[in-house]
Amino acid sequence: MSMYSRILCPIDGSPTSERGLDEAIRLALDQKASLRLLYVIEAHLAAMDPYGTVNVGDLIDSSRKFGLELLDKASKRASAQGVACETALLDTLSGPVGELVAADASGWNCELIVMGTHGRRGVKRAVMGSDAELVVRASSVPVLLVKAQSS
């Protein structure tokens, strides 16, 4: 009997996210689980320019296009290895990335979240925040964090 039948994997296109995806695919294969890939558009970042020099609509459209391409590529990668896969695209107009990931996990009734973490410390972490940390705090299911490859 499998421990996990529904695994959520948020992706962002980074090398660390790719490592998280690889681990999620391996686990889904092992557990005969279905996989949901999630991309979150950080719309609030586009709205932070106080001078109005960024066309927010274009930036969000560009992010949406990138996210859809990334989800399609990742979904094909999972499917090619025999993993049943679905995708979702959300935007942060309704909240921080970590909270959206946890809410999506709950709404989809997933049993495990697998995600890459950049492992930032100190000032970089304070400036960037930690989506992974917020997911861990907000999630009602286990979260497997896959660290960046050590250089």
Image (tube, rainbow, N blue to C red):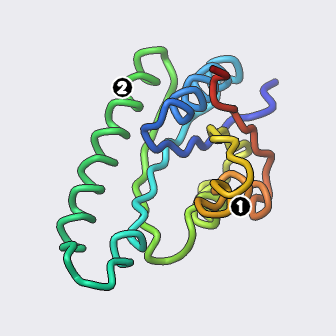
Q: Nearer the viewer, mark 1 or mark 2?
A: 1
Q: Is residue 23 above or below residue 47?
A: above
88 relative position to 108: left or right? left
* Residue 94 in sight: yes
Tag of residue 45: none
Residue found at the far top of this picture: 81
Which residue bears the numbered disc 1? 134
Q: In terms of image quadrants, where is residue 148?
A: top right
Residue 119 screen position, x and y as percent: 70, 41
- Residue at (68%, 62%) from the top-left corner? 126
Q: Secondary structure at mark 1?
A: helix
User: Could you say whether the residue bearing mark 2 is in a helix, strand or loop?
Assistant: helix
Q: Residues within 10 Å of mark 1 (few under 14, many from 20)?
A: some
Q: Residue at x 61, y 63 (%)?
A: 127
Q: CA distance from mark 1 to mark 2?
A: 29 Å
Q: Residue furthest front?
A: 123
Q: Residue 77 in the image: x percent, y percent? A: 41, 22
Residue type marked 2: Lys
Q: Is residue 139 left or right of residue 57?
A: right
Q: Can you say whether 54 is above or below 67 in the image?
A: below
Q: Residue at x 67, y 55 (%)?
A: 125
Is 150 left, or right, of 35 in this rendering? right
Percent across and percent down for residue 91 are 42, 66
Q: Nearer the viewer, residue 147 or 37?
A: 147
Task: Kindly identify the amino acid type of the residue bearing the numbered disc 1.
Answer: Leu
The numbered disc on residue 76 is 2
Name the residue: 26% across, 84% down. 51
Quarter of the image with the N terminus in it = top right
Q: Position of residue 71 (x, y in %)?
A: 37, 40
Kindly tell me whether residue 106 is visible in this rendering: no
